[in-house]
Image (spheres, grey):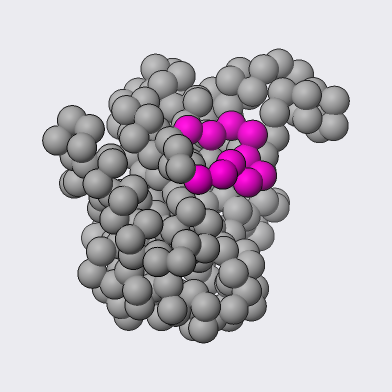
Amino acid sequence: MSKRDRIIVALDTTNLNDARAVVEKLQGSARWFKVGMELFYSAGWQAVEMVSGSGASVFLDLKFNDIPNTVQGAFRSCLRPGVGMINMHTTAGLEAMKSAMQQVQQIEVHARPMVIGVTVLTSLDEAALNEQLGMPGSVMQNVTRLAGLAKQAGLCGVVASPLETRAIKQACGQDMIVVTPGVRPVWSGTQDQRRFASPAQAFADGADYIVIGRPVTAAVDPLSAYERIAEEVEAQQGGRV
């Protein structure tokens, strides 16, 4: 699969019409869109159906974090056509992740979405982990530990910053999918990210999918911005990893 087909555009807005305008401008180019809490809590399944109706796949980024029974019920409600990837917090624990996978395994193999575990949010650094959340150790240590827990639970992969991708692959194997937010083109600002890399660098470090939002969606011409990013990543290693 080409790198450009593994760029996920984040529709981080509460306005369905704004999200639709971006999808329409990128239709035929972008293969993935992220529907997160902002849009889903505002527009619900209309947002998912809008994206899937365009022919693209949906990364349903709702980051479930609850007791096993509740997580399993949430997954049961969200396993719908068009959802190609769904996530939950690894900090929900091993049993909650196993419960999610048990629900996913009940549907047809060809319709199963990738289940991805969120490790450490890219807005957090070591000081925040240690001092605010009481999680000792470095960001890298926490990320690889949580990634190992996700693998033990049977998840397909994890969400982590580009800076931890190599360590995750080394600890969990090359087949562990890594989805990286915190990706910013060199010509774009970093916004609220603390651990970030350029799209080309993220893929070079082993990312399987990258998530990009404002550099595309807030651009004057979203299609030109998307194509510029796609060209940059395709220029590296012939566009494949």
Instruction: Report x, y in % for residue 73.
Output: 59, 64
Residue 57 vs residue 129: left or right? Answer: left
Position of residue 158 measured from the top left corner of the image (x, y, whole percent): 48, 39
Q: Quadrant of residue 113?
A: bottom left
Q: Is residue 79 above or below residue 209?
A: below
- Does 174 lie within the magenta span? no
Question: Residue at point 85% right, 25% down?
Answer: 131
* The C terminus, quarter of image: top left
How far from the left and from the top, in percent, is residue 164?
Answer: 50, 25
x, y (%) of residue 167?
Answer: 46, 19
The magenta region covers 188-197
| Residue 171 in the image: above or below residue 8 | above
Identify the main secondary structure in magenta.
loop
Q: Nearer the viewer, residue 225 or 137?
A: 225
Rendered residue at 41%/21% (across/down): 166
Q: Quadrant location of residue 174?
A: top left
Residue 114 visible at all = yes
Tell how many labels. Answer: 0
Left or right placement of residue 214 versus residue 228 in this view: right
Q: Is residue 161 above or below residue 12?
A: above
